[in-house]
Image (cartoon, grey):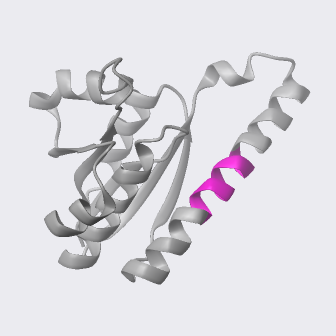
Amino acid sequence: MRKFLVILDDSRECLNAMRFAAMRASNTGGGVAVLAVIPPEEFNHWIGVSDIMREEARERIEVHYEVFAKWMRDRQNVEPELIIREGQPVDEIMSHIKEDGEIGVLVLGAGTDGKGPGPLVTQLSRNSGNLPVPITIVPGDMTKERLEAIT
């Protein structure tokens, strides 16, 4: 089964990327893999403190994910999978794509704040010619109705 890989983070544009991935998966019989990356700089503390912070970060991700997962299950009839990795976001995204042969499309949300599309879109689009899968960049301010129309 072809899966849409979407990145879960705290950005506003993440919502539209999630919606797009779920709608496309639902309409094409695909799946959704939700990847969250915990950057290593969050744990530059004593070992005991870093373990607690790492667990708290995982709990926050799981709660955030469950909001999207419930919507995907209830509205799109898609059962997403959650993958949590630790490291540099672009490196972890690339590693996961290479490790999971079912990933067919990487879905990213583009920022709307006037500072550019966002660091992931910028970094990954620079290297898009060397990626093993296509990238779909979803505008962060696209309406839900427009997303439904194009998926």
Q: Quadrant of residue 27?
A: bottom left
- Asked if 84 appears above or below 72 in the picture, the reply is above
Which quadrant, please, contains the N terminus?
Answer: bottom left
Please indicate whether residue 101 sits to the left or right of residue 149 in the image: right
**Residue 146: which quarter of the image?**
bottom left
Residue 20 pos. (x, y %): 29, 59
Image quarter hosting the C terminus: bottom left
In this rendered view, identify the residue nearer to me: 9 or 37: 9
Residue at 69% across, 23% down: 42
Using the image as rendered, state which of residue 69 and residue 94 is in the foreground: 69
Residue name at image x 18 percent, y 21 percent = 126
Determine which quarter of the picture holds residue 45: top right
Q: Position of residue 46 (x, y in %)?
A: 87, 18
Residue at 48% x, 82% y: name it.
74
Magenta stretch, main secondary structure, is: helix
Residue 144, horizontal then vertical, whole percent: 32, 62
Magenta-span inclusion, residue 61: yes
Range drawn in magenta: 58-66
**Which residue ends up furthest to the left in the rendered image?**
129
Residue 20: within the magenta?
no
**Residue 149: % across, % down:** 17, 68
Compared with 150, 58 (above or below) is above
Considering only vertical position in the picture, is 98 above or below 124?
below
Q: Is residue 66 above or below residue 90?
A: below
Q: Residue at x 52, y 68 (%)?
A: 69
| Left or right: 91 as drawn, with respect to 42 | left
Give the camera-side residue of 99 and 29: 29
Viewer-proximal residue among 106 and 138? 138
Q: Tally the marks.
A: 0
User: Taking 122 as reference, is 66 left or right?
Assistant: right
Q: Residue furthest right?
A: 48
Q: Is residue 26 left or right of residue 60?
A: left
